[in-house]
Amino acid sequence: MTTSFIRTVPVVLALALASIGVSAVAQTTAPAATAPAPAEPSTTEKVKEAGKDAVDATKRTTKKAVAATEKGTKKAWSATKRTTKKATTATKHAATKTGEVVEGAGHKTADGMRSTGKAIGEKIPGTAENEAAKK
């Protein structure tokens, strides 16, 4: 006997015994008693279930719609507040700049009028400007 033969004999015996056991179990197992099939629900019951499902789906959808509306409203309100603040700041800035420009223009105009008055006064005899120009 060779070594490979000695190794394969236990494997072959185990397989043979296993196949005998499987076939014996297959022959002795009785089929399970079949339970009666559950009765099919009536059309009325199906409609009631469908109605309940529809109500539940409507509740869920309504809750989602309310949440989305509230979220959108909050976002719109926040955006309006931010935009209003920006517009107010821009208006204040523009008003300040406009005031500075008007003030500067007023000073330049007054300086121009003073210069013009001085030039006219230098030409009129008897005025302080005329006397100062002569010296």
Image (cartoon, rainbow, N blue to C red):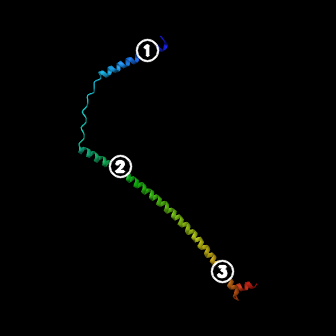
- Left of 27 or right of it: where is 112? right
Dot in front, 3 or 1: 1
Marks 3 and 2 sit apart, C-alpha to C-alpha, by 80 Å
Q: Which residue is labeled 3 in the image? A: 114
User: Where 14 sits versus 104, above or below?
Assistant: above
* Residue pictured at 36% horizontal, 51% vertical: 63
Check residue 9 in the rendering and tell me which mark sits there, or answer none.
Answer: 1
User: In the visual, does 30 lie left or right of 14?
Assistant: left
Q: Name the residue under label 2.
A: 60
Say few, some or many: other residues with alpha carbon within 10 Å of mark 1 (under 14 / 14 to 19 / 20 or more).
few
Identify the image quadrant of the C terminus: bottom right
Vertical order, 109 against 44 (above or below): below
SS for tag 3?
A: helix
> Residue farthest to the top?
1
In front of the other: 19 or 115:
19
Looking at the image, the residue that sits furthest to the right is 135
In contact (CB < 8 Å): disc 3 and disc 1: no
Single out the mark in the foreground, 2 or 1. Answer: 1
Q: Is residue 68 above or below residue 18?
A: below
Residue at screen point 43% across, 15% down: 10
Q: Categorize mark 3 by other alpha carbons within 10 Å: few (<14), some (14-19), many (20+).
A: few
Label 2, label 1: how far apart the Cα atoms are:
68 Å
Front in this rendered view, residue 31 or 135: 31
Q: What residue type is labelled 3?
A: Arg
Q: Which residue is drawn at 54% across and 65% down?
A: 90
In the image, 93 versus 29, the foreground residue is 29
What is the distance, in whole Å, between disc 3 and disc 1 at their CAs? 131 Å
Name the quadrant containing residue 72.
bottom left
